[in-house]
Amino acid sequence: MSVKYIPIQWNPNKWKYNSIMLIGVFAYLWLFIEITPSIMQNEGQINPQVHNARAFGSCAFFMLTIILCIGPLTRLDGRFLPLLYNRRHFGVMTTFVGITHAGYIINWYFAFSSSNKYEAMLFSNTSFGQLIGFPFEVFGIVALLCLCILAATSHDFWLKFLTPPVWKRIHYMIYLAYASVVVHVGLGILQDQQNIVFPIMFIASAFIVGALHVLAAFKEEYNSEQKAGAIGDWVPVCKTADMREGYANIIRLEGRERVAVFLQEGKLSAISNACAHQNGPLGEGKVIDCLVTCPWHGFQYDVRNGRSPAPFTEKIPTYSVKVAEGKVFVDRNANPPGTPVKPVALPKQGVAG
Amino acid sequence: MQSTGDYESDGNASRAAQPETVQYRYVKNLGAAKARTCQSTHWMYRMSVAGTIFLILEIWLWCGAFTALVFLTVGIDRIDEDARGAYIFRPLLLPGILLIWPFVLWRWYALEFDRGNWRNRYLPPRKVHTAVAVLLCLAITATIAVSWTVRQKWPADFKPVKLSMLVVKINER
């Protein structure tokens, strides 16, 4: 946040989240390695090195699947929001699990090469022209590289330094990582599976990720259509009767800019819908004592001036608001971040429950 | 860098006739004895490509290390007030700088000399999300379809045969 940087800002929720995550990881590995080796892998005998590699590899895949499901689930249903917080810790943990998988693989399949084992990994199979026997390791390397970049840039410093939009663009690499992992598994272990359990889990997981993303994306597109009827620079947001005390209505202006118009104690205020932290949707938060809390990571802003309460110094743009013809209008020209704007009173009869 | 095609087209050329190149230097690292036994120039070509990739990676990381040294000791205090007096978190930034140091230099330059348009900070790239979601879904479907199609059936009734015995039998014929 806007106080001095520290390595990790721990709080009780993070401890709880990380504890559950770690218990889940260890439980999965224990189940895979000790309890159900015949269900999750080939029935033929394999050595412990390969056994462990498969345990960590499949664990990383399912962790990545869960991470990618969290985003669209929260867009589809707000009850999943607690899963979104601290998702970065989940990502960093997944990276370490993936690195462990790579370590087992390299130290078994390539460790006995006459050359450097890392170079051997690249040149031992170069059959790029065929699907059967394709060097699927390449996709694993791409995925791991993506995960390493995401984990290495997960500290709050990077968000502020790169700016949230740039940071978000870099972190779109998670999709490349997942697609690479799917190819890595599809052309790799899926070709060698005698047992049907893992292929079913793998295919179901991948399809769930794809389907959830498409559903969430189209829901968002549907909900953020621009309303017609602008008067000059004033863009209509909604009818006055549609405003709810303590909540916002969101409008997307031309381009990508989104504005959240809040009703607080019978008065209207408008701020950018993008949180200064990770551009989280502020309009989906509730106003309490003039402060709206970002549903993603809990950053707070005064809706009257777009400033975080002291000692924090985050600022977001504000917008001018007016009421006319029974509608709420917002000025499409944003005020610089942190600019106070006098709230506009809303006729009482127009307020919804 | 010498075109690696030379190795492939000149399959029977002696090692002594080959020019000294960056790739070749890496092959030499295997040791002269190993290199002598490596008759296939195609094999050497593949090894040298892998060596070159790691050489590029090494250079990349050294550039990152130099950037990290300067940025974490001088730059970060100049462009971020929240980092002034905060030192414990800085080692956590090291892996990131090593990996994306060109981004770091670009942002450092932008923050030092050009504050840019403050509006851009509040324009999340959400519009791309729909396209990315559809592409991801298509990629998953295509990958699973292809990988399942080419999946080979395991011969359940296959009885393992000792290869050494097989060789003996072939030799006997």
Image (cartoon, coloured by chain):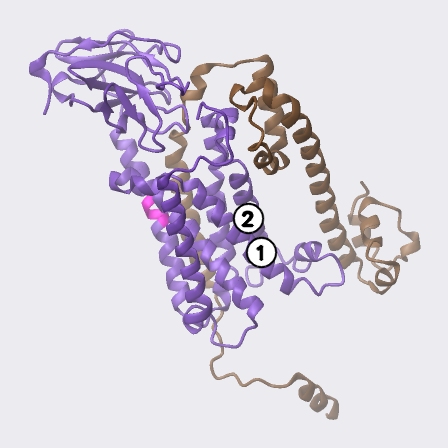
Chain colours: A purple, B brown
Left or right of A145 in this view: A321? left
Q: Say whether residue A241 is visible.
A: yes
Pick the residue in front: B23 or A133.
B23
| Magenta residue span | A209-213
Rendered image: mark on residue A307: none
Q: Nearer the viewer, residue B79 or A74?
A: B79
Residue B154 vertical placement versus A306 (above, below):
below
Which residue shows up at 39% across the image and 13% down it? Answer: A337
Residue drawn where x is 14% and y is 16% of the image: A240
Picture layout, residue B87 above or below residue A328: below
Percent x, y for residue A50? 56, 67
Q: Main secondary structure of the magenta part?
A: helix
The C terminus of chain A: image quadrant = top left
Q: Which residue is mark 2?
A: A144
Q: Name the residue: 67% across, 87% down.
A: B166
- Residue A301, magenta (yes or no): no
Q: Nearer the viewer, residue B86 or A102?
A: B86
| Label 1 crowd (10 A; few <14 / some 14-19 / many >=20) | some
Q: Are marks 2 and 1 in contact (CB under 8 Å)?
A: yes
Q: The residue under label 2 is which amino acid type? A: Leu
Residue A60 location in percent, x, y? 47, 54
Q: Amino acid at mark 1?
A: Ala
Which residue is label 1 attached to? Answer: A102
Q: Secondary structure at mark 2?
A: helix
Above or below — where is B53 with respect to A346?
Answer: below
